[in-house]
């Protein structure tokens, strides 16, 4: 990077956001995090300053952008639980779609024309084939995925008629914790597989549930492409740099290109922790796809992403160490 960028980060106090703030901070960016702290934490910000605010608050958003005058925005803030989205669709449409429109309007009003957007593999739904590449049709099967696909469309439509440029990063299953042990996931009600398994190993739950063992996969459980959070954070630094240097928009899958089943992940958590916790098999969770794996040739080619932690062992060890630290510190 040639000169330090002023970067506005919505949702920067959350799990992925905070790792990205660290990566951007290390790359020399001047950072402002805008976060309502509904699931994020001020202690998770290792760089930059925080404005505690909600994207629904158009006045505060406008005033913050006017004052900070960022070169670019990274937009993480969203509701992200698939199962919850099936129960509370309007919450998801409001928080993820309407608030993204608020942010885009405020950006354009303040002449800010560059955004990196957090999307998800859930936009593909149940793909006809895996690995899934960026040209394959979007067919989300739950409200969460639908909100992300809608915002992708909103970005594309807006970019056609304004100076807006965007980089959409479609995250596969983000997991693990900061390789230096400074950060990690800290969300009490997490529904994510690896965190739940680790919390069970630590005795925070009595048992672990496997949702569905009758999928058309090698062991009957769902397969996901787990990506280490530090590698994902690095992709944001590269995407931002690429967009500003080349004045380009693009959308990129962010995954390793191979996957693990639910049973394999649980087994790995047992071996890393050395704890044989109780696992119960139940029926399928609503709106789950059997197998989602990224084709990642494009992200490697376009922004030269070179993942460093493509190893389930590293993902689970870093998450395990972090969760132990969190439990000891009493942080939630
Ligand atoms: N899963 C499970 N038990 C849990 C949490 C998740 O069996 O306690 C399964 C879930 O049904 C899915 C996979 O693990 O097949 C990954 O789920 P997660 O919520 O981590 O991520 P998603 O793929 O839904 O974004």
Image (cartoon, grey):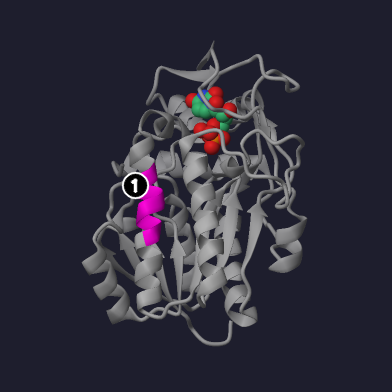
Relative placement, left or right, of 2 versus 259 is left
User: Toward the viewer: 136 or 74?
Assistant: 136
Residue identified by numbered label 1: 94
Q: Position of residue 114 (x, y in %)?
A: 50, 73
Is the magenta region chiefly helix, strand or loop? helix
Relative placement, left or right, of 299 versus 111 is right
Q: Within 10 Å of the Cα at label 1, are there few (<14), some (14-19), or many (20+) other Cα atoms? A: some
User: Toward the viewer: 313 or 132?
Assistant: 132
User: Which part of the image, by quadrant, shows the C terminus?
Assistant: top left
Q: In which quarter of the image is residue 46?
A: bottom left
In the rendered view, tell whether residue 302 sits above or below residue 255: below
In the rendered view, tell whether residue 49 sits above or below residue 308: below
User: Toward the viewer: 192 or 8?
Assistant: 8
User: Which part of the image, by quadrant, shows the N terminus?
Assistant: bottom right
Element at badge 1? helix
Is residue 274 visible in the rendered structure shown here?
A: no
Q: In which quarter of the image is residue 234?
A: bottom right
Q: Position of residue 146 (x, y in %)?
A: 51, 42
Q: Position of residue 229 (x, y in %)?
A: 55, 52
Q: In which quarter of the image is residue 237?
A: bottom right
Taking the spot 35% from the left edge, 55% from the top edge, the residue there is 99
Q: In which quarter of the image is ligand 1?
A: top right
Taking the spot 58% from the left edge, 17% from the top edge, the residue there is 212
Q: Where is residue 290 in the image (x, y as percent from the top left)?
A: 66, 27
In the rendered view, tell whether residue 179 sits above or below residue 24: above
Taking the spot 73% from the left edge, 49% from the top edge, the residue there is 133
Residue range (magenta): 93-101
Residue 233 belongs to the span the image colors magenta: no
User: Toward the viewer: 100 or 11?
Assistant: 100
């Amino acid at each position: 990077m040639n000169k330090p960028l002023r970067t506005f980060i919505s949702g920067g106090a959350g799990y992925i956001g905070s790792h990205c703030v660290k990566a951007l901070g290390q790359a020399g960016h001047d950072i402002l995090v805008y976060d309502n702290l509904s699931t994020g934490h001020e202690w998770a910000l290792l760089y930059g300053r925080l404005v505690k605010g909600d994207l629904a608050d158009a006045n505060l958003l406008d005033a913050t952008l006017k004052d900070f005058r960022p070169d670019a925005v990274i937009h993480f803030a969203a509701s992200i639980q698939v199962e919850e989205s099936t129960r509370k669709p309007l919450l998801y449409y409001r928080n993820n779609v309407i608030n993204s429109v608020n942010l885009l309007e405020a950006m354009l009003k303040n002449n800010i024309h560059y955004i990196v957007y957090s999307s998800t593999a859930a936009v593909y739904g149940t793909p006809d084939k895996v690995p899934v590449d960026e040209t394959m049709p979007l067919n989300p099967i739950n409200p969460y995925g639908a909100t992300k696909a809608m915002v992708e469309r909103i970005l594309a439509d807006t970019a056609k008629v304004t100076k807006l440029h965007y980089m959409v990063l479609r995250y596969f299953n983000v997991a693990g914790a900061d390789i230096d042990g400074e950060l990690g996931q800290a969300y009490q009600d997490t529904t994510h597989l690896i965190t739940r398994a680790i919390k069970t190993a630590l005795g925070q739950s009595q048992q672990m549930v496997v949702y569905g063992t009758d999928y058309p996969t090698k062991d009957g459980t769902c397969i996901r492409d787990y990506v280490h959070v530090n590698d994902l954070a690095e992709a944001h630094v590269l995407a931002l740099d690429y967009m500003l240097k080349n004045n380009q928009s693009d959308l990129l899958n962010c995954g390793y290109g191979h996957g693990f089943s639910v049973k394999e992940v649980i087994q790995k958590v047992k071996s890393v922790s050395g704890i044989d916790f109780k696992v119960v098999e139940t029926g399928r969770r609503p709106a789950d796809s059997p197998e989602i794996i990224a084709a990642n040739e494009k992200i490697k080619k376009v922004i030269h992403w070179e993942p460093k932690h493509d190893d389930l062992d590293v993902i689970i060890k870093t998450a395990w160490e972090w969760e132990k630290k969190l439990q000891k510190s009493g942080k939630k």
